[in-house]
Every structure is written in structure tokens, then in C-alpha cells.
Image (cartoon, grey):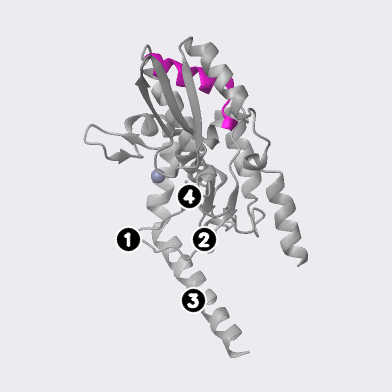
Amino acid sequence: MASLAGSRARQLSLPFEEAPLWDGYGLEAALLRETSRPLRLTLTQNRSVLLSFRRKTGVIHLRLHRMFLHAPLAVVRAVARSLRRTSRSADSEVRRFMNENLHRVRKVPRQLPPLLTCGRVHDLQQVFDRVNARFFNSALRVPLTWGRGSGRARRGGLTFGSYDPVLGLIRIHPVLDRRDVPQYFLESVVYHEMLHHHLGGIPNRTGRTVYHSRVFREAEARYPWHRQALAWEKDNLPHLLRASAELDRKRKAEAAALRRH
Ligand SMILES: [Zn+2]
């Protein structure tokens, strides 16, 4: 029970629990002001269409997911620009906001797993804070945790990190919580996942969502030890694979021991 209360207290401090910036009337008024067109706003909980509008007898009928109650003024302005069709860049700003707020779109209230950032050797929160300060003005708010290492290992490779867009959560493979794993490698993995949160997916011409886009790769290469990190991964993959298999065996043995009790 104590641990449950603990994890709940922790979740309260996370950004998605914050109070909305607008109520429905305030948001509609702001949109009216920014578009200077007759406009009716309907707020929805629709999980597949987050934003849609049509024009009927000179009035814009705009339907927005309730996540937009959390939209800063810059995003509201970008929505207005999209409605006036005067700006193409507005679309990407709105899309980024929607990507970063997907955790607000869900059937049941989100349940984050307990967050474990302090490992045996490396503290993920410290890694995150350093990367956040260097690349994001310390503005990014993303929960992260050491994973359980139960993710499928790719053949000849390991998934060192993953970003869950629905939970808005970064998981890092526990095999990296070792003394022989250098800071810069861990930072490069965390940075990669933070970029997934920050950039979201970009639809290509055929409508498929691309995650490792050119923009993504360029941003990734801005990490000063990017090349060293790639080289280190190449040199150390065999022993990390062995270490990961070892973690796996231990976890299974522990689970089996629990079942026997
Ligand atoms: Zn990736």
C-alpha cells in the first residue's frame, strides 16, 4: 500500500496532471479572436480524430479534442492559422502538440508503472536532466524508468530504449545499468528517446508515419559523442547481448521461485 501511495504522489508531480489552461468558453473566445471569423467550438473525447472542421454558411464548425484545453496560446494561434489556411508551418506545430499530448487520449485513466530511475550504477534522472539542459532548455517533461528488460531482443541487436507515445514514457533497458557502460552511451540512448517524444512521427507522402525522419537523424547527430556512441555500441554489442541473456535467466529463475512459494 505504501508503495502504491508513493507512486501516486510521484505521478501527481508529472505534467499531464496539471490543470487545463482554458475552459471551453475561454478557448472558443481565444480562437474567435485569433481567426477573426465566426466560429463554433465543440470539444470532444474522440480518440481517432483530434481536430476537424467544416465551414457551413460562413461559420467555421471546429471540433477539438479536450487535450486542447491544455494548449498554450502559441498552439491556439497555430490552430487559428491552420483554419485561415495562411500558414503551412502551423500544421506541424499543431501536430507536435497533439503528439506530445497523446497520453490525454485514452479509454481508461492512464496508469504509469512505478518509475525506477535510480539504478545500481546509473541514475537515469540525472542523465535525463543533463540531456534536457543541453538540448531542450530543460523544458521537456517526460517520465522515464529502467525497464524490466523483457522486451524482445532483436536478432543480433538489443532495443536499448523505447518510447511509449500513449503512456508518454521512456523505458531504458536494464542491461545498460553497468559500470562498463559509459555516460555518453547512456546519454545518447536517452536523447534518442527524448527526440521521439519531442518530434513525434511525420507522415510521408504515402501517409505512413516516419519516426526516424531526416529531421530526427539530424537532431540525433547533434549529440557531440554521437559517433563515439555508435562505435561503442558496435564494439560492445556481443558482451551486452550476453549480459542481457544473463538478466533474462535471472528474471525467469526469480519468477519460477516465486511461483513455487
Ligand atoms: Zn528510434
Residue placed under numbered mark 4 in the picture: 164
Mark 1, mark 4: which one is toward the viewer? 4
From the image, which quarter does the N terminus lie in? Answer: bottom right
- Kind of residue indicated by mark 3: Arg
**Residue that carries the numbered disc 2 in the rendered image:** 175
Comes first in the chain, label 2 or label 3: 2
Disc 4 marks a residue whose amino acid type is Asp
Marked residue nearer the N-terminal end (1 or 4): 1
CA gap between label 2 and label 3 equals 13 Å
- Distance, label 4 to label 3, CA atoms, is 25 Å
The residue furthest top is: 36
Q: Residues within 10 Å of mark 1 (few under 14, many from 20)?
A: few
Q: Secondary structure at mark 2?
A: helix
Looking at marks 4 and 3 on the same chain, the residue that comes earlier in the sequence is marked by 4
| Pointer 1 residue Cβ closer than 8 Å to ligand 1 | no
> How many other residues sit within 10 Å of disc 4, few (<14), some (14-19) or many (≥20)?
few
**Sooner in the amino-acid sequence: mark 1 or mark 2:** 1
Q: Are marks 1 and 3 in contact (CB under 8 Å)?
A: no
Q: Secondary structure at mark 3?
A: helix
**Which residue is situated farthest in the front direction here?**
57
Q: Earlier in the sequence, mark 1 or mark 3?
A: 1
Q: Under 8 Å from ligand 1: the CB of mark 4? A: no
Which quadrant: the C terminus?
Answer: bottom right
